[in-house]
Amino acid sequence: MASSDVLKPDHARTRRHFIFREEHERLRESIGRFVATELAPHADEWEETTFPDWVIRRMGELGFLGLSVPEAYGGQGGDYACNLVLAEEMAKAGSGGLAMGVAVHTDMATPPILKFGTEAQKQRYLAPAVRGEKIACIGITEPDAGSDVAGIRTRAVRDGDGWVINGSKTYITNGLRADYIVLLAKTDDGDDDGRSSRGEGFTVFLVDMDLPGVIRERKLDKLGMHASDTALLAFQDVRVGDDAVLGEVGKGFYHIMWELQGERLIGAAGAVAGAQVCFDRTLQYAKERSAFGRQIGRFQVIRHKFAEMATKIETARQLVYTTAWRFQNGDYPVREISMAKLHAARIAVEVADECLQIHGGAGYMREFGIERIWRDMRLNRIGAGTDEIMLDVIGRSYGL
């Protein structure tokens, strides 16, 4: 056999996943340029101040806020893979908080409006959000109810031809800047301890944040995601009309459970992308940093760390892509979405921790940015459903 016929591994060659087509790669290049030139240079500054509202307006101008939204509402009419591209490229901005603030707007707060909203609601709330003229947030979690949705206390009471809302929401990303909130509230009396039975008695409302009685109580101080604003909100006798109801009265739990699937899947994609960014930075460091007379990446113990991390990242990426393909083709793969979210969140935290360790003391310093990734990544195992909730969803799916 001639030497030219011998197959040799080509580690430098990359092949895109079947979920992506040529148009997705062109989109990736476009978003990548925007991230590199207009966002990443400000990452350190925004870590101290939160990112400014012009980011949302600018992304709206460029068409990045409605990639999978129909053109009738100002979107690009693309598929769900376009959302994955956005999440992956935003991970390169150097700011988890920025990426999260954008994702809340594009993949958490606005999709329920497209899915369940009336035409009037889509024109009033969705279309301006796609253009970047209005900023959206979503309100589910409360001071005494996070994963336990049935324990939500915020209540909407029928009053004449409208509703009066009282309660509070916490950990609300974009809460200080948002123009409106997609709000989950109780609309029945529940049982003796005030809890609604699973799936019943909840309704989703679209609430303008400038209405009387909407109070942005304070900005919350977080471990990570510093570039995003996270708020404690209060609602005191907030009056809305019937036109504020999103979807069906009493079916809000199901509407929010649908929303959470997209939130978890896009969160998983972002976690994998963030882990890849952390890996790439650390790989470069390991090739440049020397100790005991040679590059630290040449030591077997370090080389094996990279092998372990690369394997974890790739398995998570393939799980996310395959699940996303099913999701965009009409399946409702709750089990696999939960698996993807659980696995991606765990490996992202593990990779960030290992990368910090490889950097040694430098990794603990803010100037290298690894500690920021480490802090930001930790939220993935909590937000949109904790690891424990994901495990329970997966376990129950097998009839246990």
Image: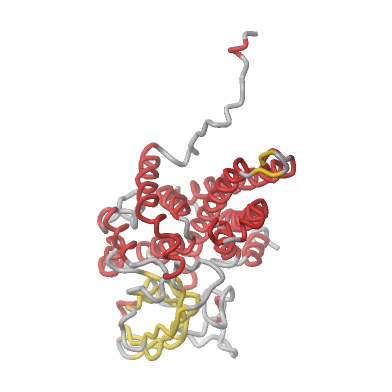
Name the residue rendered at 62%, 16% in the picture. 6
The residue sitting at the front extreme is 293
Name the residue rendered at 48%, 37% in the picture. 16
Name the residue rendered at 46%, 51% in the picture. 92
Residue 362: x and y in percent read 61, 56
In which quadrant will I find the C terminus?
bottom right
Residue 214 position (above or below residue 79): below
47 displayed left or right of 283: left
Residue 331 position (above or below residue 109): above
Relative to the observer, which residue lies in front, 250 or 170? 170
In which quadrant will I find the N terminus?
top right
Q: Quadrant of residue 192?
A: bottom right
Relative to the observer, which residue lies in front, 319 or 99? 99
Residue 63: x and y in percent read 30, 53
382 displayed left or right of 172: right
Residue 213: x and y in percent read 36, 89
238 displayed left or right of 275: left
Q: How is the image coloured?
A: secondary structure
Relative to the observer, which residue lies in front, 94 or 112? 94
Q: Quadrant of residue 368?
A: bottom right
Residue 342: x and y in percent read 62, 58
Residue 335 position (above or below residue 10): below
27 displayed left or right of 120: right
Name the residue rendered at 52%, 50% in the picture. 273
Relative to the observer, which residue lies in front, 96 or 395? 96
